[in-house]
Amino acid sequence: MLPLCVALLACSPPDAAPDTELADAMAEADEATAMTFGGPPLQPCALLSRAEVAAAIGPLAGDPVQPPEDAADTAEARCLWRAEGDRVLSLAGSGEGGPERLAVLEAAEPVPVEGAWDDARLQGCCLLHAVADDVLLSLDFSAAGIDLARAAKLMDLALARRHDPLDAP
């Protein structure tokens, strides 16, 4: 009987919170985004529609929001879409110097999927940086519950609107 109990205990989940790795990845993504952006901002909330984001991550819990900490520094403006189940998608952008800013991301890997960008890099599992013309966008999908292919499709949509944003996201 004792070996069975020991075996069952060995299969139990650890006491550490399972979201620790996700929280660490999101913190790294936020730090990378803050280091990357500057120059005139884009309006990231106007680059993807609610319907497009909901189709990717599920029913949204509300309107997209710009985090309060970004309000004072519009050079690092981000947009957050929250969905049921604590899923979050974040998009940030800069309207100039995109290729130079992307070059700073030495640790980022080339993206293994095709997209409508001039260049793109994947940082960690879930931070997609892409450049089209002089525009750099950063899509953090670490807490969105989607794969890279779906993230790339959202990035394509956002890049397509870089010069003609939506009136109402």
Image (cartoon, helix red, strand yellow):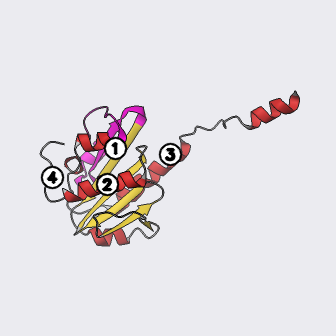
- Percent across and percent down for residue 6 are 82, 33
Where are the magenta residues, as a range?
Answer: 57-86
Q: Which residue, given by chain and number where applicable, does mark 1 sit on? A: 56
Q: Residue at x 40, y 59 (%)?
A: 32
Q: In this image, 88 relative to 12: left or right?
A: left
Of residues 34 and 20, the one drawn nearer to the viewer in this rendering: 20
Within 10 Å of the Cα at label 2, are there few (<14), some (14-19), or many (20+) other Cα atoms?
some
In the image shown, does 25 or 1 lie closer to the viewer?
Answer: 1
Q: Compare marks 4 and 2 and give the one earlier in the sequence.
A: 2
Q: Are marks 1 and 2 in contact (CB under 8 Å)?
A: yes
User: SS of the residue at dot 1?
Assistant: helix
Q: Tell me the crowding category of disc 3: few under 14, some 14 to 19, or many 20 or more residues within 10 angstroms, Cα based.
A: few
Q: What residue did someone put label 3 on? A: 22
Closer to the chain start, of discs 1 and 2, is 1
Looking at the rendered structure, the kind of residue marked 4 is Pro
Q: Does the CB distance between marks 1 and 3 fall below 8 Å?
A: no
Residue 67 is at least partly visible in this image: no
Which residue is the site of mark 4? 165
Tag 4: Cα neighbours inside 10 Å, few (<14), some, or many (≥20)? Answer: some
Task: Give the mark nearest the N terminus, 1 or 3.
Answer: 3
Q: Residues within 10 Å of mark 1 (few under 14, many from 20)?
A: some
Counting from the top left corner in percent of width and height, residue 31 is at 41, 55
Image height of 118 relative to 59, above or below = below
